[in-house]
Amino acid sequence: MLKYALLGFLNYRSMSGYDLERYINASTGNFWHAKLSQIYMALKGMEGEGLVESHIEPGEGRPDRRVYDITGAGRAALTDWLSTPITSLEPEKNTLLLKLFFARQTGKDAILTQLRLQRDLHRKQLERYTGESAQAIQRAVESNPAIADETILWEATRRYGVLYEEMILHWLDETIHTVDSSFPDGE
Amino acid sequence: MLKYALLGFLNYRSMSGYDLERYINASTGNFWHAKLSQIYMALKGMEGEGLVESHIEPGEGRPDRRVYDITGAGRAALTDWLSTPITSLEPEKNTLLLKLFFARQTGKDAILTQLRLQRDLHRKQLERYTGESAQAIQRAVESNPAIADETILWEATRRYGVLYEEMILHWLDETIHTVDSSFPDGE
DNA sequence: TCGCTCATGTAATGGGTTACATGATTCA
DNA sequence: TGAATCATGTAACCCATTACATGAGCGA
């Protein structure tokens, strides 16, 4: 899957692994991320499959860079992936829900501490979506009005983040209240 | 992490790997799941760590079963894990958002097909949460009123599922409308 | 008779993280 | 002087999936 994220970015312009890491973690970071080591390995594999090509750009006063270009086969693979719809829901893994499911085996206080801490984390995340993320998209449109189309979809992914965080905050408030009023004090 | 899910179930009663698979995928399946092969390997590793013990129960007319019991060390590890709060948000991976982010490189129709298909999938998932899941918890309380406490937390995880699906359906409707009205027809 | 459930496991492979290794330049 | 940024890569390890292998009993 990372493969297609890399192809998606390389379809805009040629980049090094280092560049790709910055792009991927800055723009799709909230729903798709990768470490540098994984990106380097993925690019090597993709070059073997003929999806990308690379050449060395000598760096003056800084390290040499290996710059990757998408190939025709790479573009075809990307288009193919983009036009194939997802036909089943991806199975989730949610550590918080797992802990909560078994949490009666600890005390009320531990549960409430856990949930309140989550509330802090998600409040901050919501602020990031309504602040920085919104501004970044705003700046992208202003600096290049030709990609307004593109940014409508970027904005949709940001909007997902906002609704998701609002939903979790609502659920956390609800659950904190339920736990607080259903379980006896001082365990 | 699967380790703690297994300990959580074994803390209720002794079970085989086969039993654990049915429990985990039936009750926590919407936020934590595992394949049999992984469970067998995990149990073996946990026995090496002293978190569980096993013995063979001969099966009359059916295969022998290896039944696992949680040990004192296993209970300690579970309690420890349950009382340790999560201090940072887990990074998400969401294939739909990744496809949507790059989707302008395909046509409007492909995007709308994708989103409408998601809407069908999530409608069905919401029905499962409000139907089967709710009934399963209901039945659990009725058959054993002593675990009403426990089921308050199970209900909280189900409630998360309901709110999550409602949020996604709302977002999908919104996004379908935006794409439909912003992009030109017939690409 | 065909497929399902019960029941346990191993082996190969894939996806991803952490740690290791190197080294110049820039800025506080 | 020490930390951060730029820049690339390898190796060990962990988590998880898929495929392989076996075999009895039961119901349509």
Image: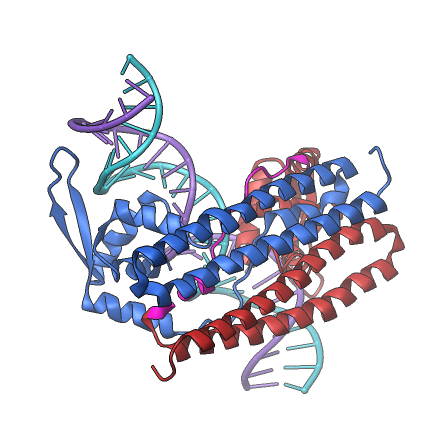
Chain colours: A blue, B red, C purple, D cyan
Quadrant of the image containing the N terminus of chain A: bottom left
Left or right of residue B135, residue A137 in this image = left
x and y percent of residue A143 in the render?
31, 55
* Residue B84 vertical placement versus B163 (above, below): above
x and y percent of residue B44 in the render?
56, 45
Residue B102 shown in magenta: yes
Asked if one can make out residue A87 in the rendered structure from this viewpoint, the answer is: no
x and y percent of residue B142 in the render?
87, 61
Residue B17 shown in magenta: no
Of the pair C10 and B87, the residue shown nearer to us: B87
Residue drawn at x 46%, y 65% is B96
Residue drawn at x 49%, y 48% is A131
Residue drawn at x 72%, y 48% is A173
Residues drawn in magenta: B82-104
Tell me how many marks there are.
0
Asked if one can make out residue B128 in the rendered structure from this viewpoint, the answer is: yes
Residue B103: name its quadrant.
Answer: bottom left
Residue drawn at x 85%, y 36% is A185
Left or right of residue A9, residue B77 in this image = right
Residue A45: name its quadrant.
Answer: bottom left
Residue A18: name its quadrant.
Answer: top left
Of the pair B164 and A143, the residue shown nearer to us: A143
x and y percent of residue B48 in the render?
56, 38
Of the pair A50 and A28, the residue shown nearer to us: A28
